[in-house]
Image: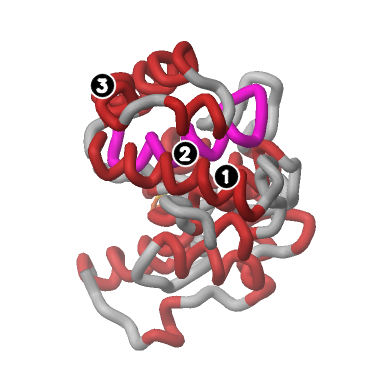
Amino acid sequence: MARHARGERLLPEVEVEEAFRRLKHEMPGRTLTAKGPKDQPDAFRSVVSCILSAQSLDRNTAAATDNLFALAKTPDEMLALTDEEMAAAIRPCGLYNMKTRNLKRLCAALIEEHGRTVPQTREELMALPGVGRKCADIVLSFTFDADVIAVDTHVNRVSNRIGITDEPTADRTAAALVHRAPPWAQRDGHFWLIQFGKAVCRSQRPLCETCFLNDLCLYFTAQKTVMA
Ligand code: SF4
């Protein structure tokens, strides 16, 4: 793949806006069936589910959350579990000893510092044990209904291929999207980019030749330059 200087890896603002306009037109966005990946009934369980989802397949995360929430649904109830009980419940999602430690510390922090409620700012969420940028943004978007583009692997890949962002990590892509995505795209951008990443701009063999963004896309331009 041809490498470009950093500046050449970013689309101009007007083309970023055009890319999002087309994504909005072509992708379903936030529909009733486009549920959040951590579709939980309250903010606490949403945060817990996010922590459990780290490096875990969705089905394994679901098994772990089902097991855990059958035993405990509040910070106090979770702290009442022994480490062994909690680790056994969340075992399906992997890294269960580390996740047990983080969940116990999370529960203690919520009780001692936040009156048993989940805070609603990114800074406070990210200060909680086990909560990173992606988890904080998912909770903000799906639980608190904030206009935030949470960045998963699809959003990260697509944003950087097109040239909407040019960042080495998902967290930095998320920070860049705050400024690079137009304000009107902050609400549903997460959905458009994920849907596009699954249907068109796939990780392996993206459908570049028929893609409705290929006249804008810097990745496609670079590929064509290499082939020429
Ligand atoms: S042209 Fe290819 S790489 Fe670019 S957005 Fe479309 S599918 Fe993705």
Give the mark nearest the N terminus, 3 or 1.
3
Q: Which of the image's four quarters has the N terminus? A: bottom left
Label 3, label 2: how far apart the Cα atoms are: 18 Å
The tag on residue 50 is 2
Q: Position of residue 147 (x, y in %)?
A: 73, 51
Q: Please tell me which residue lies in front, 202 or 218.
A: 202
Q: Position of residue 78 (x, y in %)?
A: 47, 29
Whether residue 49 is situated above or below residue 3 in the rendered picture = above
Q: Position of residue 133 (x, y in %)?
A: 50, 58
The tag on residue 106 is none
Q: Position of residue 185 (x, y in %)?
A: 71, 54
Label 2, label 1: how far apart the Cα atoms are: 8 Å
Marks 2 and 1 in Cβ contact (< 8 Å): yes
Marks 3 and 1 in Cβ contact (< 8 Å): no
Numbered disc in front, either 3 or 2: 3
Say whether residue 47 is magenta: yes
Label 3, label 1: how far apart the Cα atoms are: 26 Å
Numbered disc in front, either 3 or 1: 3
- Using a 10 Å C-alpha cutoff, classify the residue at mark 2 as few (fewer than 14 neighbours), some (14 to 19) or many (20 or more): many
Q: Amino acid at mark 2?
A: Cys
Badge 1 marks a residue whose secondary structure is: helix
Where does the magenta region start and end?
Answer: 39-56
Mark 3 highlights which residue?
88
Say whether residue 111 is magenta: no
Residue drawn at (45%, 53%) of the image: 129
Mark 1 highlights which residue?
138
Q: Please tell me which residue lies in front, 180 or 146.
A: 146
Any part of residue 29 in sight: no
Q: Amino acid at mark 1?
A: Ile
Give the mark nearest the N terminus, 3 or 2.
2
Residue drawn at (42%, 64%) of the image: 160
